[in-house]
Every structure is written in structure tokens, then in C-alpha cells.
Amino acid sequence: MPRRFGAFGGAYVPETLVPALAELERAWRSARRDPGFRSELRRWSRQLGGRPTPLYPAENFSRRGGGAEIWLKREDLLHGGAHKFNNALGQGLLARRMGKRRLIAETGAGQHGVATAMIGAALGLPTEVYMGRVDIERQAPNVQRMELLGATVHPVTAGRRTLKEAINAALRDWIGSVETTHYVLGSAVGPHPFPSMVCDFQSVIGREIVAQSRALWGRAPDLAVACVGGGSNAIGTFHPLLRTPVELLGVEAGGRGDGVGASSLTQGRPGILHGAYTYVLQDAEGQVRDTESVSAGLDYAAVGPEHAMLRASGRVRYVSVRDDQALRAFHWLAEDEGILPALEPSHALFAALREARRRPRRSRVVVTLSGRGDKDLEVVLQHGSHRPR
């Protein structure tokens, strides 16, 4: 029975994919019980990825808020510049364990494509990446990086030409090549076992937050904040904290603030997209709505089913942040701390600062800085009017 998160999750897929998903679940469950596999995962994470990533006190940024201390979980310092490395490495090692000879992936902001290309190169597995034409144009540096790493990038020209269509194209490829190919799905979305498996590989973020905060302060943070597109960095942050008293805040993309955006948890309703029952942005007839966000990685019409359950249960609070607010937070962190954040976690930074202002100085807020902003410089410079103020 495909795993569900309350009413959400499942595996709504063509019959041809059922055996592949069953094979993947068996391999993943076997690997996670295998001390040898976990040891290999830790070794690659340390030697290639650079884990553990530090917990950094953003003192100047905190002073801007005038309330709680803000600390950054520096996933931007991972090899490749984003949290995507954690999942790509885990799935790449799993693909090799399964005897697959080729990796495919989808990507929006390009960070997952870069991570998969890096892992493919390191493991000697040819890699092909599907990316919407719109995202290729606004994330050109990451396209160049993927190609330099030996990956083939396939432009997707259907529909809105963004992440949703890239996932569609990757799924079509996988349906026709399951015997030899592993699909490295980049977020905690899609049919079971992908949401649980991606959460497993990304939960290193939350585990390190727990250990590092206890070492630094003797306790867990008061609030953990992460941006949510599909939701992999957020579920990796939140999952190890779910049974603690830590407050959890997920931050979606509000777009221009005109109701378009990409806030499926705050504006969507339950439906099925890419093989899972979850919150989906859809119109009155059930058609998937267009999305829009300054951050390519948050520009997705649905969300991982575990986030849907956490929203329905009330355990995690979800809010949205507009493009202009995220751009403002980008400039704030750059000028306050000397750190260029990706536009995705810039949404979380704005929400964290807003939360910190409401809290006493002794409180501690941890923001998962899921990626660095090199890839977004052209987009940011095009919106130069959103300077700090």
C-alpha cells in the first residue's frame, strides 16, 4: 500500500511505473538498514559535500530586526551551493546500488540539476536534465555549470516552460527507460516512495540543527524557518524537529502579490499532481493554475504531501512572501552579512526577520539558507529598485 501522510500522498501513476516504484522502495528500505550504505553516504557527504554545514550567527541581520537572534543553517556552503546535494548524492548511490546505468533529473532553479550532474560525474553515470525554457533563460549560469559537468540539458517548451513541465518530461523519459535509468526526483514531491526517500536524505539538515544548537546554546531553537516550493529543504529541516516544542514556519512564494504566485499551501486545495494527492493550485474546473515567482525553484503549482499533512494538522504554519519582499531580504543579507542568498531562501529570510521582530532578544530563530545567490544575480540586478530600506 503506497504510504500516505494522513489523507495525502499515495502513488497515482501509469501502470508501467508501478514495478519501478516498488523496486525503488525495496532498494531504499534495504539501503537505509544497511550500515555500509549509511557509512558510504556519510563519507561522500563529508569528503565531497563538505558536511557538516555550520550554524552561523547573523548578528547584523538580527539587529535589523531588533528582536530575536537569527542564525543561518549554511546549506549554501555545500558543494554545488545548495541543499540539493544531499538528495542527489543519496539517490545517486542508490541508483548505483540498483545497477542503473543512467541518471535523469528535472530542475527549476538549476541547483538540483547541478547537484545531479556533479554526482553523475563522480559516480561515472551519464546524466540528462530536463529544464523549462523559461528557467533556462533566467538561470543561465546553472545551465552552463551542468554542461561543463558533462550533463545533457534538455529544454522543455511545453506549457509554462517551467518546473511543472520539466517534471512531466522527466517522468515521460523514465516511463520508457526504467530498466536502465534512475529518475533523481529533486524534491519531496511525486509518488511514493519519493517524498519519504527525499525527506530521509534531506533530514541531515534538521539533525545537524538539533546537535549544533544544543552544543551552542544547550537547547533547540525557538523557531525554525525554511522556504517551500516542492518542499525538500523545508521537510529536511522540519522532520527531525516535529516531536520537539520548536515552532516551524514554511514560507511560500507569493509572486507579485496579485494572487498569481506559487503558494499552494496557502491558496491551493487538495488535488493530484505528479502522482501524489496534495495541495495544488487549481481553478474551479480542477485545471492546474499558472504560477509565477521571481525564484525559479519555488515556481511550482503543488507541494510535497508531508507538507500538506503538516498544514492540515496545524503542526507547521505556512505563510507567503512577495517577490519584492524576498528581493529586499536578499539585499539586506548581502549588505549586513556579506552573504549572497539564493532567491528561494530570501523568502524565508524576510519571514524570519518579520517573526524575529515580534520575539524577545533571548529567543533564537534558525533559517535554513538552502542555497547561494550566484545563480540569481542577473534576476536581482534586473530588479534593482528593491534596495534595502
Image (tube, rainbow, N blue to C red):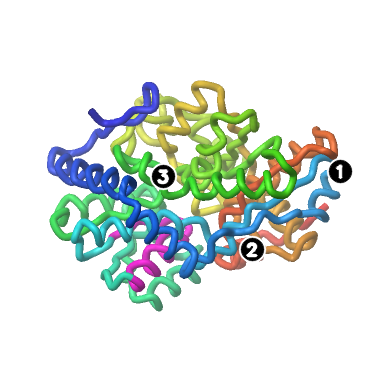
* Horizontal side, residue 300 vs residue 234: left or right: left
Which residue lies under the disc numbered 1?
A: 66
Q: Which residues are magenta?
A: 104-122
Which residue lies under the disc numbered 2?
A: 382
The local crowd at label 1, few if under 14, some if 14 to 19, many if 20 or more residues have their Cα within 10 Å, is some
Q: Amino acid at mark 3?
A: Asp
Nearer the N terminus, badge 3 or badge 1? 1
Q: Please name the residue shown 39% across and 30% down the image.
A: 278
32 lies above or below 125: above
Nearer the N terminus, badge 2 or badge 1? 1
Q: Which mark is residue 222?
A: none
What is the x, y in percent for residue 121?
A: 34, 73
Nearer the N terminus, badge 3 or badge 2? 3
- Residue 334 belongs to magenta span: no
Which residue lies under the disc numbered 3?
A: 200
- Displayed quadrant of residue 373: bottom right
Question: In the structure shown, which secondary structural element does the residue marked by tag 3 occupy?
Answer: helix
